[in-house]
Image (cartoon, grey):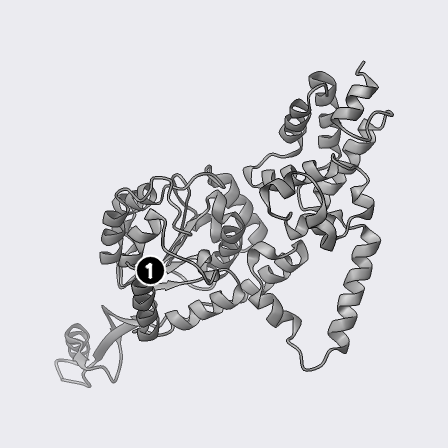
Amino acid sequence: MVDPALLERLLPGTASGKLAENVMHFARLLRAAGLPVGPHKVLGALEALQTAGVERRDDFYWTLASVLIDRREQFEIFDQAFHIFWRDPKLLERAMSMMMPAVQGRMDEQGTPPPNRLAEALMPKQQRDDTRAEEDEVVLDASFTASEREVLQRADFETMTNAELAEAKKIISQLRLPIPEVRTRRLHPDPRGRRVDLRATMRASLRSGGEILTLPRRAQTLEHPPLVVLCDVSGSMNRYSRMFLHFLHAITNDRDRVHAFVFGTRLTNVTRQLRHRDVDVAMNAVADTVADWSGGTRIGASIHDFNQRWSRRVLGQNAVILLISDGLDRDLGRELSKEMDRLHKSCHRLLWLNPLLRYRDFEARPAGIRAMLPHVDVFMSAHNIDSLIELGKVLNQPSARGALASTRAARASFGV
């Protein structure tokens, strides 16, 4: 039997036999924040607490964490929710999102407010409904203002709520990359082609008894070049990489010759998983395949693996590479410059999409960024829907002189 005074000191509000009730409310908070916490996990958490005990706050914390979360990317939400909820269990009933930075706890120690979806979950349901109703009323009555879709296109993926993320995924599923077609060495029958098809001419002559008929002609085939995407799924890119994977699913099912790879501490080919028509099934397949999701980042080792195993298979016929990463390498850029140089020479164009460019005061100080930047053709931001639309415009330009000029200017400004 746990001493009530000790329990009250460790976990305020739980000494009067309300521990099970508070665990249930805490699970509801996590579920409202988007974590898959069902009744079976609540029962499992209570059984685990009976075994581990609640004499130490750390034991209580890690017992709940081991039962209620099962993925690395869920830990941030759990951590902030725990230190907010168990500091004051009644906070769920009276906290509003605009008051979140004033709450005392781990949030103030780190200096960062909780994510929007946690603030949205902490807000009482009635207040959430009232707030949404007020927002809808403002949108309907407003004039000469930006539409809701335009505002959403400019919003950063990291700051979006669950509802905004769902709407953003619908918009992303409709985006396309209009990469210009290139001439290939292969020929196809064309009555106005410049080249005479000698084989077809001889076959037609034999069929007509040796008489020379109209000369069949051939022309070069026009087709889209291969598109290869290397997406960083490390912990610092967690929210962005999820949105980019939805974007990759859209373009993979829209055209052929798209090859998708993800990397954290290792390289994983997810092209086959993304080809499934159902986006939910595709995302679950990717999650089951990738073992290093939201972990560390080894960009140099991952690009080396790609150059050794996949470069000759997928980088033919003027291939275009999209490298999506923040450039924060755990190996401090060792051998990264060499591997980036080889990658750049193996493709027609190399575009680097970096979410950190959304900051006006961005500087290329990390060793990984300084090693990568000299070897890319286009260096641009990718943190919202507008940036993905701008990517389509850049890819639609065969020469991309404007993008190349801006990239050279960026290198000069960063001293690279």
Compared across the picture, whether 213 is left or right of 26 comes to left
Counting every numbered tag in the picture gives 1
Q: Which quarter of the picture shows residue 278?
A: bottom right
Q: Residue furthest top?
A: 1
Which amino acid type is marked by label 1?
Answer: Phe
Q: Give the quarter of the figure containing the C terminus.
A: bottom left
* Mark 1 Cα shell of 10 Å, populated few (<14), some (14-19), many (≥20): some
Is 355 rendered above or below residue 20? below
Q: Looking at this view, name the residue that lies furthest to the left.
A: 210
Q: In the depicted view, which residue is nearer to us: 358 or 361?
A: 361
Q: Secondary structure at mark 1?
A: helix
Q: Position of residue 320 (x, y in %)?
A: 32, 62
Please state if 159 lies on the left or on the right of 412 as rendered.
right
Q: Nearer the viewer, residue 43 or 355?
A: 355
| Residue drawn at (77%, 32%) of the image | 23
x, y percentage for residue 410?
34, 65
Above-or-below relation of 163 to 67: below
**Vertical placement of 2 versus 366: above or below?**
above
Q: Nearer the viewer, residue 204 or 350?
A: 350
Q: Which residue is mark 1?
A: 414
Give the image location of residue 46, x and y in percent. 75, 25
Q: Which residue is pictured at 76% across the width and 52% down the height?
A: 96
Q: Where's the N terminus, which quadrant?
A: top right
Q: What residue is shown at x 31% (from left), y 41% (from top)?
A: 301
In percent of width and height, residue 141 lies at 77, 77
Residue at image coords 79%, 44%: 92
